[in-house]
């Protein structure tokens, strides 16, 4: 097996820049069942920001807000609304990851630095990717604190019940028309990723709009990044809408894995998380299309969960509505039962569901 030119252990964390981190942290606890684990801010000696770290199993989100209006964080929120700034990658050697990717053409965002406290040290370095998004390499083998130096352990009085989310399955980026192949090449040449799948406008289209998508993955498959760009259509596609309201390229959605999608989605719905709706007709010939599945069709229909099959098995998936006021970032809940793919058979139904939402917003 070829040696990975950039060994990655998985997703370390995903950092959002948000307008109000305290309230965002509350939302992720009450709605998604994340647990508050760490905090950094004025009380801990950090003067320019407040950051809340919430966690569920292997998924760690950092929610960061600006204390001052002229900071880079405030600018980011002003421009993009609440959105993902950092896709952090867990590595064994942050300095080598940085040096080798920069040597292969990555644009540096933060030179390697080591931060320490009584629990040890964390090494970090960052490179730019699409839009204002960055990848931060995090090396934490010599650290046993709750998150990283600068943060203190923090819990909440809130009684939080997890909903069964396990790990980040994939993160999807939206880029401008004509830039998808550039970024696929970046991941191949700079990061050593391989092209896994390609979807064109024949695969992902409706009467009105279309998109193109390519999926890149690192060697061990722990990190998968689909990259989307708009395709020509009669009306504005969901990618165009995202680019317009996010004011440029960025992370469109984060897919999180569960081992029991029926429980997870029922629980999320009960807590007020809103999902895209596909019409009843989707279920009428589902078994003919998909073949035998373990789940009860009535349960899937009731929760509006989609199913798709590939050569290796099947998957169940559902997409939330945007979790911000702008029609930008959303989540996918996914359960894989052998399938390695991304639900190609559901694209048309999903696209039509998204278009119905776009029409309600006056953006189709």
Image: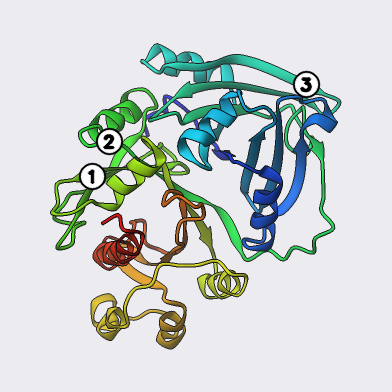
Where does label 3 land, which residue?
116
Please indicate whether residue 176 sits to the left or right of residue 320 in the image.
left
How would you rate the neighbour count of disc 1 (Cα within 10 Å): few for under 14, some for 14-19, many for 20 or more? Answer: many
Q: Quadrant of residue 179?
A: top left
Q: Residue at x 47, y 78 (%)?
A: 303
Q: Nearer the viewer, residue 101 or 107?
A: 107
| Disc with the residue nearer the chain's start (1 vs 2) | 2
Residue 252 visible from this viewpoint? yes
Say the numbered circle drawn on residue 176.
2
Mark 1 or 3, closer to the camera: 1
Q: Residue at x 24, y 82 (%)?
A: 288
| Disc with the residue nearer the chain's start (2 vs 3) | 3
Q: Is residue 155 above or below residue 305?
A: above
Per the model, the C-alpha gap separating discs 2 and 3 is 39 Å
Q: Position of residue 240 (x, y in %)?
A: 28, 45
Q: Position of residue 75 (x, y in %)?
A: 53, 28
The image quadrant where one finds the C terminus is bottom left
Callouts 1 and 2 close, C-beta under 8 Å: yes
Q: Secondary structure at mark 3?
A: strand
Please indicate whether residue 135 sits to the left or right of residue 207 in the image.
right
Q: Residue at x 61, y 28 (%)?
A: 138
Q: Residue at x 65, y 56 (%)?
A: 27
| Disc with the residue nearer the chain's start (1 vs 3) | 3
Q: Nearer the viewer, residue 184 or 75?
A: 75
Where does label 1 land, which residue?
230
Residue farthest bottom in this picture: 298
Q: Secondary structure at mark 1?
A: strand
Q: Nearer the viewer, residue 343 or 152?
A: 152
Please indicate whether residue 281 sits to the left or right of residue 190 in the image.
left
Q: Position of residue 229 (x, y in %)?
A: 26, 42
Q: Position of residue 32 (x, y in %)?
A: 62, 61
Q: Secondary structure at mark 2?
A: loop
């Amino acid at each position: 097996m070829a040696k990975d030119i950039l060994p990655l252990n998985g997703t370390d964390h995903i950092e959002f820049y948000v307008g109000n981190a305290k309230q965002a942290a509350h939302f992720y606890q009450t709605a998604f069942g994340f647990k508050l684990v760490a905090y950094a801010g004025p009380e801990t000696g950090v003067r320019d920001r407040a950051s809340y770290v919430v966690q569920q199993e292997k998924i760690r989100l950092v929610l960061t807000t600006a204390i001052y209006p002229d900071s880079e964080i405030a600018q980011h929120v002003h421009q993009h609304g609440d959105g993902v700034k950092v896709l952090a990658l867990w590595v064994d050697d942050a300095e080598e990851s940085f040096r080798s990717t920069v040597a292969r053409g990555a644009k540096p965002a933060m030179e390697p630095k080591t931060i320490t406290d009584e629990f040890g040290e964390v090494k970090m370095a960052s490179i730019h990717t699409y839009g204002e998004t960055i990848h931060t390499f995090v090396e934490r083998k010599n650290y046993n604190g709750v998150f990283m130096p600068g943060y203190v352990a923090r819990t909440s009085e809130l009684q939080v019940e997890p909903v069964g989310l396990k790990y980040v399955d994939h993160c999807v980026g939206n880029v401008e028309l004509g830039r998808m192949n550039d970024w696929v090449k970046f991941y191949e040449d700079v990061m050593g990723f391989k092209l896994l799948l390609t979807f064109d406008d024949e695969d992902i289209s409706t009467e009105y709009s279309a998109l193109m998508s390519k999926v890149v993955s690192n060697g061990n498959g722990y990190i998968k990044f689909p990259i989307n760009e708009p395709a020509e259509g009669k009306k504005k596609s969901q990618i165009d809408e995202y680019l317009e309201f996010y004011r440029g390229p960025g992370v469109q959605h984060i897919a999180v894995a569960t081992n029991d999608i029926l429980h997870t989605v029922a629980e999320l719905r009960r807590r007020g998380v809103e999902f895209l709706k596909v019409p009843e007709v989707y279920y009428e010939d589902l078994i003919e299309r998909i073949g035998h599945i373990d789940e009860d069709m009535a349960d899937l229909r009731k929760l509006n969960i989609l199913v798709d099959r590939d050569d290796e098995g099947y998957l169940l998936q559902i997409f939330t509505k945007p979790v911000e006021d702008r029609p930008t970032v959303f989540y996918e809940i996914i359960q894989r039962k052998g399938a390695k793919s991304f639900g190609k058979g559901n694209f048309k139904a999903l696209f039509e569901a998204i278009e119905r939402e776009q029409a309600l917003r006056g953006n189709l």
